[in-house]
Amino acid sequence: MRNYELALVLFSTLSEEQKVAELEKVKGLITRFGGEVVGVDDWGKRKFAYEINKQKEGFYYFIKFTSETSAPVEIEDRIRIMETVLRYLIVCLDEDN
């Protein structure tokens, strides 16, 4: 098992219920592929340095999780097609990769 962090940016036009639902979907993807969510850091709404898809701000989340090495690829494949996600990035936190 390795430690990972998922940086996730959602559209700023989402309601509170939609944000929670999308976050739960992502956490569900992590557990679906054998991962375990360790923590979620909610940074709230932040302004971008430049426009992304005609948006000037978005909701930032940082999700720490542990999983096997094959899970991040599967998770990224599913997040890529989510319409409410502006940007995402999964990084490995282990030093020996």
Image: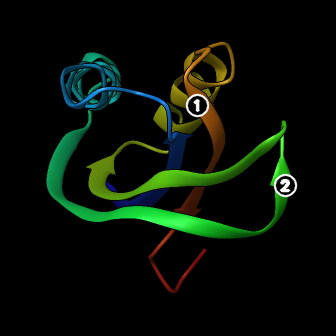
Dot 1 crowding, Cα within 10 Å, few <14, some 14–19, many 20+: some
Number of numbered discs: 2
Which of the pair 56/74 is nearer the observer? 56
**If you read the primary sequence from the N terminus, does the residue marked by circle 2 or circle 1 appear first?**
2
The residue under label 2 is 51
Residue type highlighted by circle 1 = Val
Task: Say which quarter of the image contains residue 54.
Answer: top right
* Left/right of residue 83 with respect to residue 44 in the rendered view: right
- Report helix, strand or loop for mark 1: strand
Q: Quadrant of the C terminus?
A: bottom right
* Mark closer to the observer (2, 1): 2
Between 97 and 31, which is closer to the camera in this rendering? 31
The percent coordinates of residue 72 (x first, y second) are 53, 39
Rendered location of residue 94, percent (x, y): 45, 77
Disc 2 crowd rating (10 Å Cα; few below 14, some 14-19, many 20+) is: few
Q: Which mark is residue 47?
A: none
Q: Secondary structure at mark 2?
A: strand
Q: CA distance from mark 2 to mark 1?
A: 14 Å
Q: Position of residue 89 (x, y in %)?
A: 63, 53
Q: Which residue: 45% across, 75% down?
A: 93
- Taking the spot 39% from the left edge, 42% from the top edge, the residue there is 68
Q: Which residue is mark 1?
A: 85
Judged left or right of residue 25, residue 76 is right
Q: Is residue 65 above or below residue 42?
A: above
Q: Amino acid at mark 2?
A: Glu
* Quarter of the view holding residue 86: top right
The residue drawn where x is 57% and y is 16% is 78
